[in-house]
Image (tube, rainbow, N blue to C red):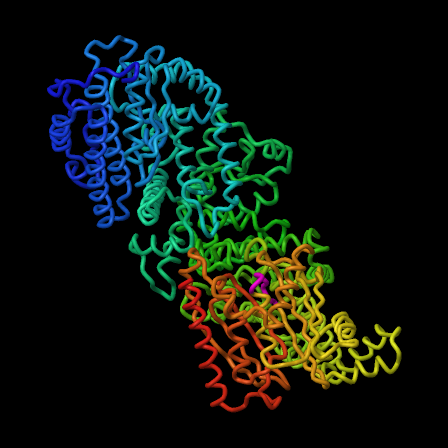
Amino acid sequence: MTPHQEPLAALDSKSALATFVPAPPNSIICAPTAIFDTAAVEAALEDAFAASSSYSDVRSQTVRILGKASEQGRAAIESAIMQAPRNARPATHAYAWLTDCIVTTVLYVSQTKLHPNQTPSTGEDIAVLAVGGYGRAEMSPHSDVDLLFLAPHKITGWVESVIESMLYIFWDLHLKVGHSSRTIRDCIQLGKEDYTIRTAMLEVRYLAGNRALTEELQQKLRDDLFKSTAREFTEAKLAERAERHKKQGGQRYVVEPNIKEGKGGLRDLQSLFWIAKYVHGVSDTIDLVKAGVFTQDEFRQFDEAETFLHAVRNQLHLITKRPMDQLTFDLQVEVAERLGFIDHSGRRAVEHFMQFYFLHATRVGELTRIFLTALEEQHVKQEPALQRLFKRKRKTVAGFYIHGGRLNIDDPKAFLADKLNLLRIFEESLRTGHLIHPDVMRLISANLDLFDDAFRNRADAKKMFLDILLKHGNPERGLRRMNELGVLGAFMPEFQHIVAMMQFNMYHSYTVDEHTIQVVSNLAQIERGELIEALPVASGILKRGINRKVLYVAMLLHDIGKGRKEDHSIIGAQIARKVAPRLGLKPAECETVEWLVRYHLLMSDIAQKRDISDPRTVRDFAKAVKTRERLDLLTVLTVCDIRGVGPGVWNNWKAVLLRNLHAQTADALEHGLEAVNRETREGDAKKALREALKDWSQTARRAEINRHYGPYWQGMPTSVHVVLAHLMQDIKDDEIKIELKPDEDRDATRACFAMTDHPGIFSRLAGALALVGANVVDARTYTTKDGYANAAFWVQDADGHPYEQARLIRLKQMITKTLMGEVVARDALVSRDKIKKRESKFRVPTSIIFDNEGSEIFTIIEVDTRDRPGLLHDLTRAMASNHISIATAQIATYGAQAVDVFYVKDMFGMKIHSESKRNSLEKKLREAIEQGAKRASDA
């Protein structure tokens, strides 16, 4: 027996469990007795205790009975949730009440059975309180249980024993309990020192024990801690919020958002309520309306957002069977299905679900802004230093004034009487550098119906909108605020369709509307001269002069056709044909905007999916763009579009491809398409190599140049020709020569090979590189006239960068072993060729296209399918087994999607003209893809 253990309590104790267990809340998702049947639990406990003869028996029986009750209660709640998955609040209340019942029953057992004390001193009359999220009576299936054991004075030995026994039972029940044992004095002192503890104290909720002590704590917290410290608490919570957002990526539109900690998530709503409770003393969110913080409509939006986020969180916990707040790609699909979203209108259920999520997250941001401004006006929150500086900026136009560092209006009625003010406010905000006052935002949001066709077609409205885009150097700020308030979609109804639209793939980091604004932002950065070093071509184009109006409007509309069954470029062009004239563009400008929207992916596709060293590629592209003006416009649009996809998507590899394509096409447009031909390029390449090898003997130079066929000269730069020439010097028939070197200009590692040619060499090289996790982005293999293979591969590591010098040794060893036959790539790849769970829900249909027109001497095979580590090896192995020789390969990846393009010939060195041969090869390639995909999914 421990020092504070007493003899086992008499089994006919007068204490009844019903006096400990709290009554169920009014709003609960199913019958209280289905969640926790107090009478049945008490009867089971008494029967078990009657047969118990030791403390361990009592404890084990308590754990058994409560474990079963908890399991049944959770099953009842989960069943009710599945029937009404979006009825989240009654569900969170149900989980909280079930936890209340478990906690108070454990207290009952500990006080009356394990440590009975018939005459407790005043110092032993403790209270058990719920704190934090549990204190709010909001719990998800696997939320933590945070408890405060509150004692009037010093914690006595008996109190310690009671708490210790309770904790052992909680742990045996596998409850994740956070606990503290404190006096009122401790709570006040620690609350002064630690804002986390102070926040937890805000939401203490009585569970059992000394109720008067709880009320005394709450009074002292208000009088001795909360009073007169509202400003410091508010600043601390806002600083905590900013840091939390920073950790979560700082964006509301993160593709795998954390629904609790992320921007626009549950913690933001909770922070608002904490501050409101601290400042205004509110006890329920509805009191925010009485306090004048929110309108009734804003409270409704607050409530809807919180309810939806809780519904999502409940499903995350139930699916994963653990506390999970990250809405990962694989979970998004299952949560969408459970919440009743379905596929329709050409979009997946998960995309509709995530659009709904982001709309709520955006509204949470707006509610936060409204709330914080109200605090500023009450001098509870300090005005940001940047806005204090803005006070000294330009004067406003008539009808507007600066209030609290924000742009406000003199008279709401007068403001609404002139509809142009609905746009002027944004233009004035950009002109003066002031943010718009939330009261004005409220007014605008409530009057979006003023945007009608008559207003949209007014000349002054068109001009005002274009001024927002073109005049002030930072249009993204105005566009983003207009979008958040619904103004962009009201003025341009076609835009509303893409607001908060999520694209369910791993390539795009933003929703379609946010991506569009990011694209515009990139253009503005180029115009401001901030990207001259990173984007010399695009910067030069803008410096030389270009139609800015056409470019900005095209960027605003380039993805407006997304989210429909048809090709978004075609639909987008049709929409642009209607919108551009409505914005006041001239007929010729409208035609250019329509063309840019229709072909906004053309340059990116050509650069990344075709061999731009092939003269036919450049000629065909030049024919498509027709003029230097369109080439320049398309180049800038393409660069901004790729950079606007997300962090890390733009790199030097893409930059070099686009730069080269622009330069070659500009040259072709200037000097004529006839100048772009294989003969000219071959002659230029040979001349360049002679110059580079001038220290060689004439005989050696001639031998090197004569050993290669024509395609070799147009496919690689002189620097690679030089490397391969040196590798080929004195090479033996059984020798494999390799040179690995970082190609910093292209953000890749260049791997050059020279060896005796044999079938399947491309596949072996691809397999060797896959084994070390290398991603091939470009590859070229050529056979010399004397039977050697010369190859150059450009590869990147898993992060899309060149390999570090220290890793090149292992890379070279693996390549050598594979080429020597010591490692069989196909077998070795089995354990590595797998698809991660979080990426398993992406659908990428396989498409295989044969093109005999895009190259003069090769058949182009374009394979569009699901990416995985062993894909390139499987495809090239299938081609090798069908006697197809590969000259070049361009590998483009878009998240989970891979587009592998091969320039090939048949075993006779000819294009694949026979339809039956193409069909047979396509069948083999599809089999290779399907077998590899099955292997990867089973791994």
Looking at this view, is 10 or 442 the one in front?
A: 10
Instruction: Residue at 46%, 85% (x, y): give it.
Output: 919
Numbered-mark total: 0
Looking at this view, is 421 or 929 the one in front?
A: 929
Q: Position of residue 408 (x, y in %)?
A: 51, 37
Residue 893 is drawn in which quadrant?
Answer: bottom right
From the viewer's perspective, tell me whether residue 195 is left or right of residue 297: right
Looking at this view, is 434 or 568 the one in front?
A: 568
Q: Quadrant of the N terminus?
A: top left
Whether residue 95 is situated above or below residue 290 in the rendered picture: below
Residue 225 is drawn in which quadrant?
Answer: top left
Looking at this view, is 134 or 871 the one in front?
A: 871
Whether residue 596 is situated above or below residue 225 in the rendered picture: below
Q: Position of residue 4 (x, y in %)?
A: 29, 15
Instruction: Residue at 69%, 77% (x, y): give it.
Output: 734
From the viewer's perspective, tell me whether residue 475 is left or right of residue 230: right
The magenta segment: 771-777
Q: Position of residue 889 (x, y in %)?
A: 60, 74
Residue 187 is drawn in which quadrant?
Answer: top left
From the viewer's perspective, tell me whether residue 630 is left or right of residue 26: right
Is residue 590 visible from the viewing direction of this image? no
Is residue 776 visible from the viewing direction of this image? yes
Instruction: Residue at 23%, 28% (x, y): give it.
Output: 59
Q: Is residue 347 magenta?
A: no
Q: Quadrant of the C terminus?
A: bottom left
Q: Is residue 776 magenta?
A: yes
Instruction: Residue at 70%, 69% (x, y): give it.
Output: 738
Q: Position of residue 882 (x, y in %)?
A: 52, 84
Whether residue 796 is situated above or below residue 607 in the rendered picture: above
